[in-house]
Amino acid sequence: QYGEQLRAEPGTILYQPGDPVNGSSIYFIVAGLVRLDLPVSERLSVYLHPDSVFGLVESLLSSPRLTGACCLESTILYRWDREGFDLASSVSWELAFNTITGCTQYLRVLNAEFSGRLRLAGASAAGQGA
């Protein structure tokens, strides 16, 4: 509702890091599997399954894409522009819940990944100062 449904084949790249956010840029996975790649010193990937919402952060911030998104299998997606997503999430508590849950899971993955790196960097710096 308030958006459009699309089908994507395995290997379809939905967007890449640095791509501008325009038009229908917020996605919901109806069926299939999508990999989000965060370009850090080595690639960090997050795998998203049905009921996952992604592409939201960049849309809210009006910033270029921070991640890349690629379909790993035949995938059915629903996508909205910012206004359509706002309308859809205001009438669907399930969509609002899935959005909050998805953002929380993604942040937990990033926190686990980067807190470990920060501890290693801190330990290395402490060892050099001794």
Image (spheres, helix red, strand yellow):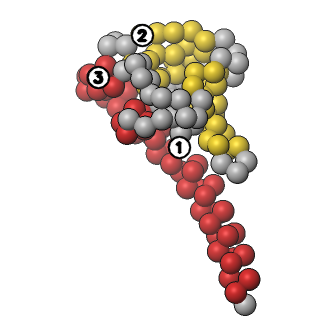
Query: In front of the other: label 1 or label 3?
Result: 3
**Residue where numbered disc 3 is placed:** 83
Locate residue 86, reporting x and y percent.
29, 26
Q: Nearer the viewer, residue 52 or 129?
A: 129
Amino acid type indicated by mark 2: Glu
Locate residue 68, reporting x and y percent.
60, 32
Dot 2 or dot 3, earlier in sequence: 2
**Residue where numbered disc 2 is placed:** 4
Q: Residue at x 31, y 19 (%)?
A: 84
44 relative to 80 in the view: left or right: right
Give the class, few, some or many, for how many residues have Cα within 10 Å of label 2's Cα (few <14, many ≥20). few
Q: Residue at x 64, y 37 (%)?
A: 37
**Residue where numbered disc 1 is placed:** 106
Q: Residue at x 74, y 83 (%)?
A: 128
Q: CA distance from mark 2 to mark 3?
A: 13 Å
Q: CA distance from mark 1 to mark 3?
A: 23 Å
- Tell me the SS state at disc 1: helix
Q: Residue at x 43, y 37 (%)?
A: 63
Q: CA distance from mark 1 to mark 2?
A: 24 Å
- Tell me the SS state at disc 3: helix
Locate residue 35, reporting x and y percent.
64, 30
Q: Is residue 128 above or below residue 85?
A: below
